[in-house]
Image (tube, helix red, strand yellow):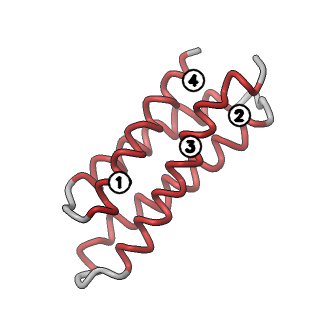
């Protein structure tokens, strides 16, 4: 399978990683940072896994599908946590995570 067939998923992973990085940075500026610890941790994990998945897909790695399955799980967990918070950055991150989870699940099933 060519990497061009993965492009939508690669784009979703990169967008999600950016949203997670932004969310983590914004959470660090919240008044009660301690209350955001789980969100920040999920953001960091999700961003890293998204970047790894995008990299593997761009190289057409034999491990890309397995990484996308893991990435989809991390994205779902991050979306769930971010959705618990009312801040705009958390809501935007949750949406990006949901989109990425769907794209990764579809890619892994292909």
**Figure quadrant of the C terminus:** top right
Quadrant assignment, res 3: top right
How many residues crowd mark 1 within 10 Å: few (<14), some (14–19), many (20+)?
Answer: some
- Residue ID for mark 1: 92
In the displayed structure, 28 sits above or below 46; it is below
- Residue ID for mark 2: 57
What's the distance in space between the residues labelled 2 and 3, CA to CA?
10 Å
Q: Return the x and y of residue 30 as percentages of the image width and height.
A: 29, 80
- The numbered disc on residue 13 is 3
Q: Return the x and y of residue 98 as percentages of the image width and height.
A: 37, 39
- Tell whether 49 sits left or right of 23: right
Q: Earlier in the sequence, mark 3 or mark 4?
A: 3
Q: Earlier in the sequence, mark 2 or mark 3?
A: 3
Q: Return the x and y of residue 102 as percentages of the image width and height.
A: 43, 29
Which one is in front, 34 or 4? 4
| Discs 2, 4 touching: Cβ within 8 Å | yes
Q: Earlier in the sequence, mark 3 or mark 1?
A: 3
Q: Earlier in the sequence, mark 2 or mark 4?
A: 2
User: Could you tell me which secondary element the residue under label 2 belongs to?
Assistant: helix
Which one is in front, 69 or 97? 97
- Residue ID for mark 4: 107
How many residues crowd mark 2 within 10 Å: few (<14), some (14–19), many (20+)?
Answer: many
Residue at position x 60%, y 40% from top? 11
User: Could you tell me which secondary element the residue under label 1 belongs to?
Assistant: helix
- Tell whether 65 sits left or right of 25: right
Disc 3 vs disc 1: which is toward the camera?
1
| Discs 2, 3 touching: Cβ within 8 Å | yes
How many residues crowd mark 4 within 10 Å: few (<14), some (14–19), many (20+)?
Answer: many
Which one is in front, 24 or 62? 24
């Amino acid at each position: 399978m060519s990497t061009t067939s993965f492009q939508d998923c690669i784009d979703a992973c990169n967008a999600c990683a950016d949203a997670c990085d932004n969310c983590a940075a914004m959470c660090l500026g919240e008044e009660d940072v301690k209350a955001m610890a789980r969100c920040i941790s999920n953001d960091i994990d999700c961003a890293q896994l998204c970047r790894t998945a995008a990299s593997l897909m761009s190289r057409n790695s034999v491990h890309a599908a397995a990484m996308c399955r893991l990435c989809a799980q991390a994205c779902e967990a991050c979306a769930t946590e971010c959705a618990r918070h009312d801040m705009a950055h958390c809501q935007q991150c949750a949406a990006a995570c949901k989109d990425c989870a769907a794209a990764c699940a579809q890619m892994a099933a292909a």
